[in-house]
Amino acid sequence: MAAVARSAEAVGEAIAIATTLYDLDAVAIAGGFAQVADDYVERVAAAAHAAAPHPYGRGVRISGSTLSGDGPLLGAAALALRA
């Protein structure tokens, strides 16, 4: 479970940075590792909100994707269809 905690912390910090740079309102977590633990998305959200350097960064909504593990595959397919 240490790997899960380290991953959630790293992903949360990355989201905090992206939120600060791009003024994001929401982030969806997708892919296989996002389902590695029942509370993974909550851990990521807690880490992101703790790492946010500005108050507006703590307002970002972080949720799990409704596409389950197929999100990256569907995104790649959509990109290929546009090419």
Image (tube, helix red, strand yellow):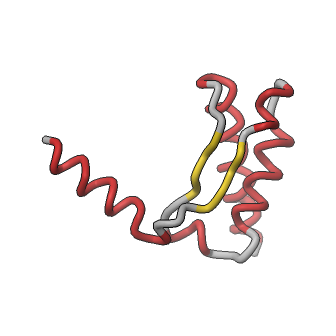
Quadrant where the N terminus sits is bottom right
State the residue at coordinates (64%, 25%). Answer: 23
Q: Position of residue 43 (x, y in %)?
A: 78, 60
- Closest to the observer, 23 or 17: 23
Q: Position of residue 61 (x, y in %)?
A: 71, 46
Q: Position of residue 41 (x, y in %)?
A: 70, 62
Instruction: Say whether residue 76 is left or right of residue 8.
Output: left
Instruction: Say whether residue 65 is left or right of residue 61.
Output: left
Quadrant where the C terminus sits is top left
Q: Is residue 34 above or below residue 60?
A: below
State the residue at coordinates (62%, 23%). Answer: 21
Q: Is residue 14 above or below residue 10?
A: above
Quadrant position of residue 73? bottom left
Q: Is residue 78 above or below residue 51?
A: below
Instruction: Say whether residue 57 is left or right of residue 77.
Output: right
Report the number of numbered marks.
Answer: 0
State the residue at coordinates (62%, 75%). Answer: 36
Q: Position of residue 74 (x, y in %)?
A: 32, 60
